[in-house]
Amino acid sequence: MKGLPITLLFQYPTVAQLSEVIEQQRPSDAWSALVPIKEGGKRPPFYMVHGGAGHVFNYQKLADSLAKDQPFYGVQPPDWTGYRVEPPQVEALAQRYVQEIRQFQPEGPYYLGGFCFGGMVVYEMARLLQKAGQEVALLALIEPSALGDRKSLFLQKQEGVGPQVGELPLFGFDKDVPQSFMGKVRRAGYGIMMRSRRRLMRTFLQVKRLIFALYVASGAPIMRQHRDYYLMEFVTGKSRKLYRPDGSFDGQIDMFMVQRNRFLNQTLGWDKVASGGVQMYQFATDHIGVIQEPYVKEVAAALQARLDETQQAHE
């Protein structure tokens, strides 16, 4: 069998089990979008959609940090195993994943989550399930990709906002700056330093992307060590830029986010597409830090509290 998904390691962790799968060539197991990261327990399963790199390996710590009896299934594209991947439509991915989940769990309520690019996909999944008459008891977005362009995310009519605000990053959190005269001087100096650093980093990333784009255009195979970057920038990155939600989710969205600049819409635009509003949980880390030690335990505790609340409401 060619192109076995590496996520089979979750399902068949021993050499003997993997050998049996390969010998028997069991495509129904190998090519499923559902990856059982933690099985067992009487609770309803929680489904977590992959991020921009198209895999769910980085969800293991989150799954382990939830309640022992909380089943956790990763959701990922089973066929992104070749050298090249065409940028998918978010809506098409969502439809495919909903079909697989409903084969595994035909009826709701459903407990759904997504990280980064997966936030867009799981949002569409939730809307598809609602359109099919199914209940989505929990929609959890963990550091989802922003909706809309960068400028639209900054709050308007804020006093003291200068041109430097447009240079502030989407990821990270503010420092507390005193409002005294010396505090303002320190802030100005810090702002100049940070703007210079960001411009240098932005230039570096632009050059890196240009070089990699030339490599991709050459038709050469994508090496494994560069695959995550390729998928995030040239596959899901393109899909993310084209995505525009058509409608609204009927209910509340729970968002697990980092602390951002106070002039930025903390929900990254998601508050505009939830009829029941947004419940925010914020953490003093960076984008990837929410699913890594040590902050993943804080995120898991907040997520588990919401799972407990919604599950008890449906008992």
Image (cartoon, rainbow, N blue to C red):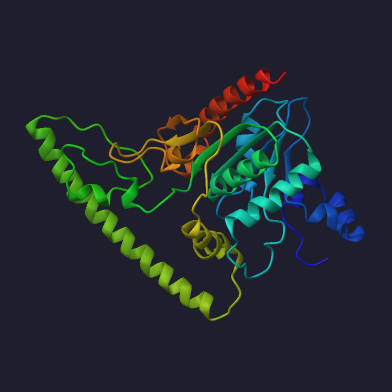
List x then y, in percent, for residue 286: 42, 41
Q: Which corner quadrant of the image does residue 185 belong to?
A: top left
Toward the viewer: 222 or 100?
100
| In the rendered image, the vertical position of residue 247 relative to residue 84, given as above or below | above
Residue farthest along the right direction in this orientation: 24
Q: Who's the residue at 40% across and 33% down the image? A: 284
Q: Who's the residue at 61% across and 42% down the image? A: 127
| In the rendered image, the vertical position of residue 199 relative to residue 164, given as above or below | below
List x then y, in percent, for residue 113: 60, 39
Q: Who's the residue at 57% across and 43% down the image? A: 123
Q: Who's the residue at 68% across and 55% down the image? A: 77
List x then y, in percent, for residue 133: 70, 37
Residue farthest along the bottom direction in this orientation: 218
Q: Is residue 142 left or right of residue 158?
A: right
Q: Number of labelled discs?
A: 0
Toward the viewer: 315 or 298?
315
Q: Is residue 52 left or right of residue 167?
A: right
Q: Is residue 204 left or right of residue 46?
A: left
Q: Quadrant of the C terminus?
A: top right
Q: Quadrant of the N terminus?
A: bottom right
Q: Which corner quadrant of the image does residue 223 belong to?
A: bottom right
Residue 79 in view of the camera = yes
Toward the viewer: 144 or 65?
144
Residue 294 in view of the camera = no
List x then y, in percent, for residue 72: 69, 36
